[in-house]
Every structure is written in structure tokens, then in C-alpha cells.
């Protein structure tokens, strides 16, 4: 499926409000991570790719983080976010294909991953790893959650296993943490891995 049809697919899903794994709130493991960050992190350049309804972006903004970039290639969730947060800087709302982002234009201190990896076709996971590493400054971090379950389906979300994820990321990242979440939302209990990876 090409980029255009992928974008149309997601646009339709958002217009129909049919993102089945949307929790309607900031992910508890990610909120816990954000809450323990030092004040010095609030000016760091943060990317939230495939942000969708972007509850995490909203939470970061509410907590005083000033350099957060939301990327999604479906305009619907970006427009909805802009309505919810009219003072959020528009230049940090990027309607684009993650895989087309230019490392010459974008470099981040860390990335917040909220199952975006599990929304893209599994055939592109190595492409994701390479692109993610290129957008991170040296020794910077990729932090977030992945689904720790094989859904056995041919549409998003696509799950996987810890072992498979380790193999994908090992080429460009050192794995600091990749463990089952202890504080998942009840609807996701037992099905999420928390990851903290450092770009090589």
C-alpha cells in the first residue's frame, strides 16, 4: 500500500473515530516517565511520531515542555489537536509521512513512541529503526510502549514479541529497558512493553 493510500486509510479511521486501541487518555506508563523527568528536560527537542490523537503531546505541553513536535500524515488528528490546544505552536504540528522527514531539518533529543511502531506495516520495521536513529542526536533516546502480543491480523495494530523487537533495534540502538509494563491502562494490562533505547 502506497503512502497516499496509507494516509487516506488513517484519515478515514480518524474521521470515523475507529481507532480501536485509542485509550482516550495519556498512556499511564508514558505519563509516569514524563512525570519523573527533570525540569531541564522541558526545553529538549521531543518528537512524537504517528501521534494520532496525541494525548501525550497534550500532556507534555500542559506540563511546560516547550519543544515538542507532533507528526502524523493524517490531517484529522492534527486539526483536532490544534482545536484542543490553540496556543500550541503550529510549526510543531507536522502533517507528513514520518519516513519522509529529513534528518537535515529535524534532530531530536528524544522520541516518545506510543505504539506508532505497531501501527506501521511490519515489513517497514527495519526502515523505522534506521529513520528513527537518523532523527535522533547521538546518544539520544527512544522511549515508549510497544504491544507485547501477536494479534494475528493483517491490519493495525500489528503486535510482536520482545525477541523480535530486540533483533530489529539492535543494529542502531542499545537497549536500556525493554520490559513488560507494570502500570498499563487496564485495557492493555499484560500486553505492553516499556522501552528505553539509546541511539548508537
Image (tube, grey):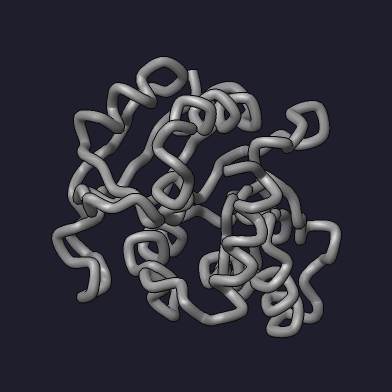
Q: Residue furthest left?
A: 190
**Residue 61 location, quadrant:** bottom right
Identify which residue, 160 or 195, lies in the foreground: 160
Residue at image x 21%, y 39%?
161
Vertical relation: 73 (above or below) 172: below
- Number of numbered discs: 0
Identify which residue, 101 or 66, lies in the foreground: 101
Residue at image x 71%, y 34%?
107
Q: Position of residue 40 (x, y in %)?
A: 60, 50
Residue at image x 52%, y 81%?
17
Residue 110: tell me if it is visible: yes
Left or right: 42 as drawn, with respect to 148: right
Vertical relation: 146 (above or below) 79: above
Q: Position of residue 47 (x, y in %)?
A: 62, 48
Q: Position of residue 33 (x, y in %)?
A: 39, 57
Residue at image x 30%, y 32%?
165
Vertical relation: 127 (above or below) 47: above
Left or right: 23 as drawn, with respect to 104: left
Left or right: 88 as drawn, with respect to 161: right
Task: Specify the quadrant that holds the N terminus.
Answer: top right
Q: Position of residue 111 (x, y in %)?
A: 55, 44
Residue 70: tell me if it is visible: no
Q: Residue furthest bottom?
A: 84
Identify which residue, 55 or 13, lies in the foreground: 13
Amino acid at each position: 500500500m502506497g503512502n497516499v493510500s496509507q494516509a487516506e486509510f488513517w484519515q478515514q479511521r480518524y474521521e470515523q473515530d475507529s481507532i480501536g486501541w485509542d485509550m482516550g487518555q495519556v498512556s499511564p506508563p508514558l505519563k509516569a516517565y514524563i512525570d519523573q523527568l527533570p525540569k531541564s528536560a522541558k526545553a529538549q527537542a521531543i518528537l512524537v511520531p504517528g501521534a494520532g490523537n496525541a494525548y501525550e503531546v497534550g500532556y507534555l505541553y500542559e506540563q511546560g515542555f516547550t519543544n515538542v513536535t507532533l507528526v502524523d500524515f493524517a490531517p484529522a488528528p492534527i486539526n483536532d489537536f490544534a482545536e484542543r490546544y490553540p496556543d500550541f505552536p503550529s510549526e510543531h504540528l507536522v502533517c507528513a509521512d514520518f519516513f519522509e522527514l529529513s534528518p537535515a531539518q529535524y534532530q531530536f533529543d528524544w522520541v516518545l513512541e506510543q505504539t506508532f511502531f505497531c501501527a506501521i506495516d511490519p515489513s517497514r520495521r527495519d526502515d523505522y529503526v534506521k529513520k528513527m536513529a537518523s532523527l535522533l542526536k547521538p546518544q539520544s533516546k527512544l522511549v515508549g510502549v510497544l504491544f507485547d502480543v501477536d494479534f494475528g491480523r493483517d491490519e493495525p495494530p500489528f503486535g510482536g514479541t520482545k525477541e523480535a523487537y530486540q533483533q530489529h533495534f539492535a543494529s542502531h540502538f542499545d537497549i536500556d529497558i525493554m520490559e513488560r509494563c507494570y502500570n498499563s491502562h487496564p485495557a492493555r494490562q499484560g500486553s505492553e512493553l516499556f522501552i528505553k533505547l539509546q541511539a548508537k
